[in-house]
């Protein structure tokens, strides 16, 4: 437990620091998280053989993530970044298919499907945390992402310990309860309201209702993301995605809920706050 708390605190401090600074430090941190999580998911999906540490899909995927994040940091606006993502994805898929042709008949289709899924599901979704930070009042929206995921997770844990009676998804995560889930939603909504209150006191803009509702919605999405990642682990017969974070497992085990929450919070806030 001590190791888990210490490593969790270190990750949280990195998030707070890079989120506060924003710009390239945040982009670099998210890039590192994305590459590690991409590798973990690709391996979990069976795209990487046990006797191999790297393969062409992994190397090409890392290069694709690098190009996308570099372009994201210099794109100037989100539309250009989305076009870049589309271009990178097209080139990546073509390269993977050509790789399959060259390797045939030793070619394994999991190398392509796993690589493409992992690339979209992880680096692209996580990049919305950076996009959110670059919005007007982005530091508050960025905080909302982690309030909706990590504060939700912490609140759900304590609520489940205190009041948990009914299992939420016993086959996927036996320890999660309905009461814990509700506690997580309440905790995230309360944390989001506090963030909105600070925004109001500092900048005079009232988004308390929007932030509270977004936090509640984001917490439900974050729990879905957690369960979705757990479902993949159950199907693949693994306990953790990796061991890069002591006490937590892999990067995917720590960021599974954030992956879902980041694009949802970004879309809600950019739409209803009328900012870009």
Image (cartoon, grey):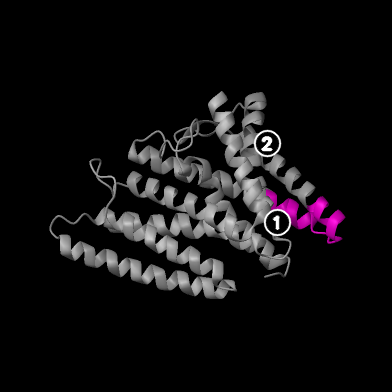
Q: Work out which quarter of the rendered image holds the N terminus and state it.
A: top right
Nearer the observer, 181 or 57: 57
Residue at 28% across / 67% down in the picture? Answer: 95
Mark 2 residue crowding within 10 angstroms, few (<14) / some (14–19) / many (20+):
many
Q: Look at the image and tell me whether residue 219 can be seen.
A: no
Residue at 74% across / 51% down in the picture? Answer: 212
**Magenta part of the protein: which range?**
196-215
Mark 1 residue crowding within 10 angstroms, few (<14) / some (14–19) / many (20+):
many
Residue highlighted by disc 2: 183
Q: Look at the image and tell me whether residue 236 can be seen.
A: yes
Q: Position of residue 102 (x, y in %)?
A: 16, 64
Q: Main secondary structure of the magenta part?
A: helix
Membership of 203 in magenta stretch: yes
Nearer the observer, 107 or 84: 84
Label 2 SS: helix
> In this rendering, is residue 246 above or below 139?
above
Q: Work out which quarter of the rendered image holds the C terminus and state it.
A: bottom right
The mark tally for this picture is 2
Label placed on residue 139:
1
> In this rendering, is residue 246 above or below 97?
above
Circle nearer the viewer, 2 or 1: 1
The quarter of the picture where residue 211 lies is bottom right
The residue sitting at the left extreme is 105
Q: Position of residue 7 (x, y in %)?
A: 55, 34
Is 57 positioned to the left or the right of 275 in the image? left
Residue at 59% across / 37% down in the picture? Answer: 10
Residue at 23% across / 67% down in the picture? Answer: 98
> In this rendering, is residue 92 above or below 210?
below
């Amino acid at each position: 437990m001590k190791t888990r708390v210490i490593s969790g605190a270190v990750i949280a401090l990195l998030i707070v620091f890079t989120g506060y600074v924003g710009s390239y430090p945040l982009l670099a941190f998210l890039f590192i998280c994305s590459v590690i999580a991409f590798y973990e998911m690709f391996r979990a999906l069976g795209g990487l053989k046990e006797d191999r540490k790297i393969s062409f899909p992994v190397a090409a995927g890392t290069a694709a993530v690098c190009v996308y994040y570099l372009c994201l940091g210099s794109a100037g606006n989100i539309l250009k970044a989305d076009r870049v993502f589309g271009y990178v994805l097209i080139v990546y898929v073509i390269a993977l298919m050509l790789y399959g042709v060259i390797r045939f008949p030793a070619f394994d289709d999991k190398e392509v499907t796993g690589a493409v899924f992992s690339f979209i599901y992880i680096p692209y979704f996580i990049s919305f945390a950076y996009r959110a930070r670059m919005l007007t009042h982005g530091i508050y929206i960025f905080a909302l992402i982690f309030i909706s995921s990590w504060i939700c997770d912490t609140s759900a844990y304590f609520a489940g310990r205190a009041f948990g009676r009914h299992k939420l998804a016993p086959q996927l995560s036996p320890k999660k309860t309905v009461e814990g889930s509700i506690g997580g939603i309440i905790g995230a909504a309360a944390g989001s309201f506090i963030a909105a209150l600070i925004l109001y006191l500092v900048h005079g803009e009232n988004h308390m209702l929007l932030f509270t509702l977004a936090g509640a919605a984001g917490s439900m999405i974050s729990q879905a993301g957690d369960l979705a990642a757990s479902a993949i682990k159950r199907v693949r017969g693994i306990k953790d995605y990796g061991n890069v974070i002591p006490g937590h497992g892999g990067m995917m085990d720590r960021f599974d809920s954030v992956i879902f929450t980041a694009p949802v919070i970004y879309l809600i806030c950019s739409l209803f706050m009328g900012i870009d």
